Amino acid sequence: MPTKTELEKNDRELLEIIAKSSSVVEKGRENFDAGDAGTALRIAEGLEDVSKFSLYELLVYDLDGDGEISKKDADNILRLSVGLAPAYATGGLADFTGPAWLDGTKSRPELVLNQKDTQNFI
């Protein structure tokens, strides 16, 4: 019998597979507005009952595909709603084609890897 931790890990992996393989989820992310950012933030803070959302809606809000909707996801939804690129100040995987915000400086540069090199780290 799998442990609760193993089941949660399997659930997260399944959600990642669904999110990464579904063009429908990507399509749902094309029309974010400030209301979506507010909803995502309320979910992240535990102020919203997630049982009222469909799996599709939750996958759309989970931008980084980690199986949970975080404040980082909410911030990036807000950025997308006003035409800005998602930010990765604390790292993360960019599983989309398009611009992304980098926070590197001369003294603290950031490294961008291609797909093959990224797979070597994962």
Image (cartoon, rainbow, N blue to C red):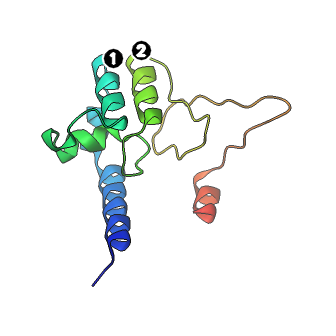
Q: Residue under label 2, please give it.
A: 82
Q: Where is residue 80? Give x, y as percent.
A: 42, 23
Q: Is residue 96 left or right of residue 36?
A: right
Residue type marked 1: Ala
Q: Residue at x 44, y 44 (%)?
A: 64
Which numbered marker is on residue 59? none
Q: Is residue 98 left or right of residue 43?
A: right
Q: Where is residue 115? Give x, y as percent.
A: 57, 53
Q: Where is residue 96? Give x, y as percent.
A: 45, 41
Residue placed most toward the observer, 65 or 25:
65
Element type where label 2 sits in the image? loop
Number of residues whose C-alpha sits closer than 10 Å to that of mark 2, classed few (under 14), some (14–19) or many (20 or more): few
Q: Which of the marked residues, 2 or 1, is nearer the chain's N terminus?
A: 1
Q: Residue at x 31, y 56 (%)?
A: 15
Quadrant in which the C terminus is drawn: bottom right
Number of residues whose C-alpha sits closer than 10 Å to that of mark 1, classed few (under 14), some (14–19) or many (20 or more): some
Label 2 to label 1: alpha-carbon separation: 8 Å
Q: Residue at x 32, y 27 (%)?
A: 30
How many marks overall? 2
Residue placed most toward the observer, 55 or 44:
44
Q: Where is residue 83? Give x, y as percent.
A: 44, 17
Residue type marked 2: Val
Element type where label 1 sits in the image? helix
Q: Residue at x 42, y 35 (%)?
A: 73
Q: Are the two marked residues, 2 and 1, in contact with CB atoms closer than 8 angstroms?
A: yes
In the rendered image, which quarter is residue 100 located in? top right
Q: Is residue 77 above or below residue 96?
A: above
Quadrant in which the N terminus is drawn: bottom left
Q: Residue under label 1, please give it.
A: 34
Residue placed most toward the observer, 6 or 117:
6
